[in-house]
Amino acid sequence: MTKIITEEDISDAAECLKKGGTVVFPTETVYGLGADAFNDAAIDKIYKAKGRPADNPLIVHIADINSLHALTDKVSEDCRKLMDKFWPGPLTIIFPKSDKVHMRVTAGLDTVAVRFPSNPIAQRLIKESGVFVAAPSANLSGSPSPTVARHVIDDLDGRVDYIITGCDCDIGLESTVIDMTGDIPNILRPGAITLEMIKDIFSNATEDRCTFSDVEKPKCPGMKYKHYAPKAEVQVVIGNKENTHRYIENQLIKHKNSGVMTYKGGDYSDAACVLSAGNNMNEYAAKLFYNLRVFDEYKVEKVFAEFAEEDGIGTAVRNRLYKSAGNNVIEV
Ligand code: TXA
Ligand code: MG
């Protein structure tokens, strides 16, 4: 049975992690499903609880920079620059892995992904447990990452030992993943730490192609799977306010049981459900996964999502939204 607790009982959850159990905890990005990274049986429980393919590696979470030496033999000057600027926070760095890190965590890769979250509950859990916490997002494989406790419970109640409920996740999209093992810094998954922010430190930094297309073999294995998909069919609608409104209104006449995700306001009286994605891209990021799950709760068949191409975290929003729509995007 899953124990659903608050921060008050965090010591019980930390003890459980130490003994090889599974614990869901909030982070500033999305909720994570944690287990001891050095315990293969515990790691197996993560893959089983999520129904996650075994070739998709996990991020190892730490709560102090000194513990990094157990995961990688050499931390380059460039990595130090990133750590100084962005840790703790929503940036995952890929390092060459040390011999100690098990292949079960890295899914056979010779690199390891490491993140130092800023959320105080996450930090306390990692510190009190004394273990390295491998943690993917706390959703069933394929569905949108959970950003509120209720959505974690929907997916994982009965499948994990503990769920620590906390505040809703501020950022709402998973961390930026950056590969620092090649010649130049390369973003494999966009997030709240944007390419522009990385370029302030490394002007030659790049963003991987797999971010926006379904290439066969992305460097970030998780990017090849169908992701973030609600049960409803999603169509992204881009254009000026007037055109998107007219297009969606017309669609709603044809498709009765549809939802609309509005951006910067909008009225749709024929929709079965209208959810707002806010007024700027930070709000869109924070609400996207939440909204996708709420559309499913309303059992709508189609979702029309208003969207606008914007820089900054807009790149990460676009990446997740387009994936949730299976790249069904229309410009009107
Ligand atoms: O914000 C986050 O990163 C959340 C919270 C819980 O920290 N975690 C998260 O984990 O999003 P997950 O497993 O859902 O996504 C991790 C991504 C996957 O796409 C995986 O393929 C990639 O990181 N990844 C992990 N290790 C890697 C490695 N060594 N090389 C390349 N990609 C890696
Ligand atoms: Mg995930």
Image (tube, helix red, strand yellow):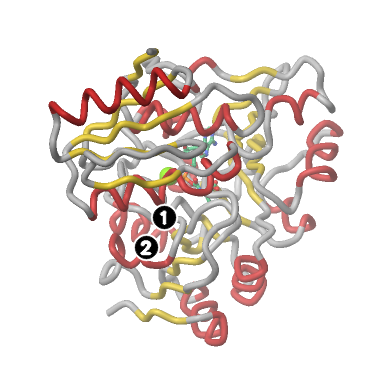
Q: Indicate the position of residue 148 as horizontal and vertical percent values.
A: 44, 62
Residue 107 visible within the image: no
How would you rate the neighbour count of disc 1 (Cα within 10 Å): few for under 14, some for 14-19, many for 20 or more? many
Report which quarter residue 228 is drawn in: top left
Residue at 37%, 36% (x, y): give it.
Answer: 55
Residue at 69%, 26% (x, y): give it.
Answer: 195
265 relative to 309, above or below: below
Figure quadrant of the N terminus: bottom left
Q: Looking at the image, which is closer to me, 283 or 321?
A: 283
63 relative to 90, above or below: below
Q: Secondary structure at mark 2?
A: helix
Residue 121 visible within the image: yes
Which label sits on residue 214?
Answer: none
Q: Are marks 1 and 2 in contact (CB under 8 Å)?
A: yes
The residue beneath circle 2 is: 152
Report which quarter residue 270 is drawn in: top left
Q: Is residue 307 left or right of residue 119?
A: left
Mark 1 CB within 8 Å of ligand 1: no
200 relative to 228, above or below: above
Q: Indicate the position of residue 29 as horizontal and vertical percent values.
A: 56, 51
Q: Indicate the position of residue 192 as horizontal and vertical percent values.
A: 64, 39
The residue beneath circle 1 is: 146
Residue at 82%, 31% (x, y): give it.
Answer: 78
Figure quadrant of the C terminus: top left
Residue at 26%, 41% (x, y): give it.
Answer: 269
Q: Indicate the position of residue 202 as horizontal and vertical percent values.
A: 81, 23
Q: Is residue 96 left or right of residue 105?
A: right
7 relative to 136, above or below: below
Q: Looking at the image, which is closer to me, 99 or 271?
A: 271
Q: Amino acid at mark 1?
A: Pro
Q: Secondary structure at mark 1?
A: loop
